[in-house]
Amino acid sequence: MTILVAYVPRPEGQAALDKGIEIATRRNERLVVVNAGPGGRQEDPSLINGYEAERVEERLSALPIQAEFKQFVRGKSAIEEIEEMVEQLQVSVLIIGLRKRSPVGKLLLGSMAQEILLNVPCPVLAVKAA
């Protein structure tokens, strides 16, 4: 089985990564960390840069379990990429980070976390940044 972590370069992404490492190591399961966005002309704040990607890969390579980092920028939304990975891998749990948003922010921007919770067929663990 595989633990899948949806990673973004913010405190909630770091919290999700920390929890994913903890659970995957305890269960001796494969860990896959994914960072995704549609790409395009506008800079996407959810995508990590080369330095951050190297930092995550170095951290994963030091683990006593099988772990890998994947980044997708191929025109699909992060939610589409995550849903595809859940279908392709035998995911025992998907871990996502949550951030506090105002009710108006939720209304105007929607909620990626809510869409993931409603659409993926595996258990989802949502963690908050400390």
Image (cartoon, grey):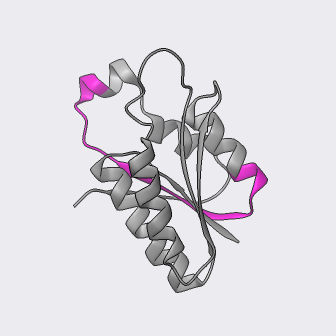
**What residue is rendered at 25% in x and 35% in y?**
101
Q: Nearer the viewer, residue 47 or 98?
A: 47
Q: Is residue 112 magenta?
A: no
Q: Position of residue 85 (x, y in %)?
A: 69, 49
Q: Is residue 56 visible?
A: yes
Q: Is residue 100 magenta?
A: yes
Picture quadrant of residue 36? top right
What is the total number of numbered labels drawn onto the structure image?
0
Q: Position of residue 87 (x, y in %)?
A: 75, 50
Q: Position of residue 14 (x, y in %)?
A: 35, 57
**What residue is rendered at 46% in x and 56% in y?**
54
Q: Nearer the viewer, residue 62 or 80?
A: 62
Dividing the image into 4 quarters, which one contains the N terminus?
A: bottom right
**What residue is rendered at 41% in x and 59% in y?**
55
Q: Nearer the viewer, residue 79 or 7?
A: 7
- Segment tinted magenta in the rendering: 86-105
Q: Residue furthest right?
A: 88
Q: Is residue 88 left or right of residue 11?
A: right
In the image, residue 93 sits, relative to residue 46, either above or below, namely below
Q: Is residue 129 left or right of residue 8?
A: left
Q: Position of residue 79 (x, y in %)?
A: 58, 36
**What residue is rendered at 58% in x and 29% in y?**
77
Q: Is residue 20 visible?
A: no
In the image, residue 42 sits, relative to residue 35, either above or below, namely above
Dividing the image into 4 quarters, which one contains the C terminus?
A: bottom left
